[in-house]
């Protein structure tokens, strides 16, 4: 049985949980925080979450885990079979994570855990986020789903990251940069929330947020 380790507030943790739910793969969860604790470093090379434990070993990095799950559990495929279309799915996920989420992520400590963010960092990150979000618009179809007229797992990943980026940018800039750059994003987010897997993740995340900030 696959064990997913991390905490239910993390968008990367929820990315893996979402894939497990969408593919109907049985799993258990272990809630733990990232750290440099020597015991954790034996399980996750950088002490980061999420990681999974399987009978044959551990895996870290959410996209690597996703690709492993897709290979090892092919019954409910995430990707289309056409190689180019498949690459377009990967392109959107990678663009979202490297060119948007990663920049917003660099603000989390300052935004929510009592750190400080210099004006220079704030301005630089905002510029990168705007470039990333505008680029995302050039790739995404939103007709009505991000890859076209059919729902795909990419929609779930977009929903997870957009939610987090909205929250961070509202806190740091007093403005939701996702809403400011992605047309009709509110309606899109509500559409994706009709998926049972996303509903489960949203409920579990709310509980985790309430417990964390109690
Ligand atoms: N590229 C990694 C990102 C994972 C990540 O950034 N996890 C955060 C929690 S959401 C973490 O463990 N941060 C602790 C750290 O960076 O040391 C993935 O896709 O799994």
Image (cartoon, rainbow, N blue to C red):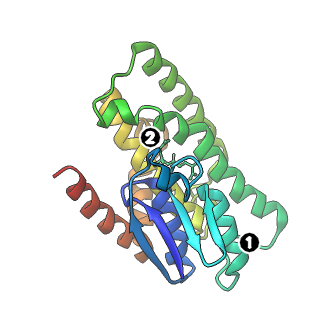
Q: In the image, residue 169 lies at what x, y percent?
A: 38, 34
Residue 196 sits in quarter: bottom left
Farthest front residue in view: 38
Work out whether residue 17 or residue 126 is closer to the camera in this orientation and state it: 17
Residue 30, image quadrant:
bottom left
Depicted 56 relative to depicted 181: above or below: below
**Marker disc for residue 178:** 2
The residue nearer to you, when weighing 68 against 130, is 68
Mark 1 = which residue?
80
Q: State left or right for residue 125 relative to residue 86.
A: left
Specify whether residue 176 is in view: no
Residue 188 point in image, percent of width and height: 45, 57
Indicate yes or no: mark 1 CB to ligand 1 under 8 Å.
no
Q: How many marks?
A: 2
**Residue ranking furthest to the right:** 83
Q: Residue at x 51, y 63 (%)?
A: 156
Asked whether, in this view, residue 139 is left or right of residue 109, the answer is right
Question: Which residue occupies 59% across, 46% down?
Answer: 96
Label 1, label 2: how far apart the Cα atoms are:
27 Å
Callout 2: SS:
helix
Q: Is residue 7 above or below residue 109?
A: below
Tell me the SS state at disc 1.
loop
For the view shown, which residue lies furthest in the left direction? 214
* Residue 130 image position (x, y, % from top left): 53, 30
Residue found 37% across the figure and 38% down from its top: 168
**Residue 128 picture location, percent across and down:** 56, 27
- Which class describes the residues within 10 Å of circle 2: few (<14), some (14-19), or many (20+)? many
């Amino acid at each position: 049985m696959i064990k997913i380790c991390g905490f239910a507030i993390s968008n990367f943790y929820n990315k893996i949980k979402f894939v497990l739910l969408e593919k109907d793969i049985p799993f258990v969860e272990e809630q733990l925080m990232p750290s440099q604790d020597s015991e954790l470093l034996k399980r996750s090379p950088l002490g980061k979450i999420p990681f999974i434990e399987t009978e044959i070993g551990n895996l870290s990095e959410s996209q690597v885990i996703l690709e492993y799950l897709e290979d090892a559990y092919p019954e409910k495929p995430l990707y289309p079979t056409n190689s180019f279309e498949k690459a377009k799915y990967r392109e959107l996920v990678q663009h979202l994570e490297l060119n948007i989420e990663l920049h917003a992520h660099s603000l989390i400590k300052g935004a929510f855990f009592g750190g400080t963010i210099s004006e220079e960092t704030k301005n630089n990150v905002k510029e990168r986020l705007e470039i990333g979000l505008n680029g995302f618009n050039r790739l995404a179809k939103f007709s009505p789903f991000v890859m076209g007229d059919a729902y795909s797992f990419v929609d779930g990943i977009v929903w997870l990251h957009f939610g987090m980026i909205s929250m961070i940018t509202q806190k740091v800039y007093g403005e939701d940069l996702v809403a400011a750059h992605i047309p009709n994003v509110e309606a899109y987010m509500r559409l994706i929330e009709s998926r049972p897997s996303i509903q489960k993740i949203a409920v579990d995340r709310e509980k985790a947020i309430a417990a964390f900030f109690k």
